[in-house]
Image (cartoon, rainbow, N blue to C red):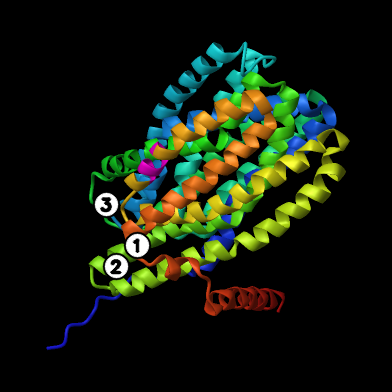
Amino acid sequence: MTETKATPPRHRHLGAGAALSVVVQGGPLFAAAVLSIVLARTIGPSGNGRFALLVTLVGFTATVAALSLASGIAYEVSRRRWSARQAFRDTYLTALVLGLVGAFGGFIVFLLTRETVFRGIDTWLAVVALSCVPATFAYQNAEWILLARERYEGYAGVEVARSSILVLVGAGLAFPFGLAGAVVGFSSSALFAAAVGAWLLRREARVDTVVDKGGSLKRAMRFGLQGWGANLMQQLNYRVDLLILGGYAASSDVGLYSVAVTLTAIAWILPTSLGTVLLPRVASLDESALLGELTADESDAAVAKSVRHGVLLMLPGAVVISLLLVVAVPVLYGSEFTQSIALGFVLLPGVLVIGVGKVLGYTVSGRGYPRYQLYVAALTFPLTLALYFTLIPAFHAWGAATASTISYVLTTLLMLFCFSRATRIGLRRALVPRAEDVADYVGLARLALRSRAIRRA
């Protein structure tokens, strides 16, 4: 009697998910860039720097409070063990509780450093900024539930809602009210996104056929906690440079550096978009291989192909960022921000390399090894802090950019080692692009043109 494989679940095109994820990754950067341009034109580099410091404080606070639950959500929902209805209820309640605790902790940090890092920033502005932490946590949870269920349009829709309010309200209020208006718009955007996420999840719950197996919140928390320390240290690696720079240099220096950071971070849009949709897909493929719905080699081939796409995306990223630095900074920001161009080119090599590292990290987590990211972060975090505290006091923004690039390269090299251990996929198979990979983009472009022609007809 011949043994037959079970039928795997029908997956949507990964490229379509990555394309819509570009909206999710690019929306906040576009909105932040618009706000920074408005602030640059209204209150100059100093105001830009103060806004960047407040946004960084909220980002760190949300990262600490979230306990990396998002990765656990993606893992549990994509493995068909957590219904959309229960995940919505569990994660929004968790967001409220942990978000309030986190916001209080973030305010304590602000009070302790208001005469150094946050000097010149009014206390009430910090309160307004931190008030959005629960909502930030909630809408991010909604995005990951929708992503895990391959509802890519809803996933992108939440971020479009947030970015739209950030631009319309934040930039609109920044003209008459400066920094205060931008901060109000920033907090309002998170509240609106949380409301949109709740509406979409309620709709999703009506069509959900997953039978909840119970205990998913606990399992998601346990999964997330394995990567929480890694995520926290990685975020510190990525953005603590702004806070340290704020303690040693003038807010105008922070403003110049933050523009370079914002523009070069655009290079992360494509690889991060790919990695974000890749985590639940890798988990789903791994589950299908365990159930005999497909072979382990088929699962490995899909993973290796996705990583190769991450490598391919480095080239367009380099071209786009170089053009933005040379053209956009003098035209949009003005002559006061000329130094941001050179700082951006110091950051660019590291930013491009860590883009591949992000894809590798999502893949490793999708295979069920989030702790490997913790190992990498534990090794790189002390070195990065040492570089920051050595180079920033002496060279200010130049030291921050140099230390960041070194940290990004080291992180990616260590993640390569962890990837080979977690997947047993050869590095050549995963890192050297093939003709078929390039052909995927041609096919995706044709698909997009065909869909556009159908809509017109």
x, y (%) of residue 77? 35, 53
Q: Residue at x 64, y 32 (%)?
A: 399
Q: Nearer the viewer, mark 1 or mark 3?
A: 1
431 w.r.t. 204: above or below = below
Pointer 1 local density, CA inside 10 Å: few below 14, some 14–19, many at least 20: many
Q: Which residues are magenta?
A: 373-378
Q: Quadrant of the N terminus?
A: bottom left
Q: CA distance from mark 1 to mark 3?
A: 17 Å
Seen from the viewer's position, the closer of residues 156 and 252 is 252
Residues under numbered marks 2 and 1 in contact, where contact means CB atoms less than 8 Å apart: yes
- Amino acid type of disc 3? Asp
The disc placed on residue 288 is 2
Q: Which residue is tagged 3?
A: 212
Q: Which residue is tagged 1?
A: 284
Q: Quadrant of the C terminus?
A: bottom right
Q: Residue at x 28, y 74 (%)?
A: 295
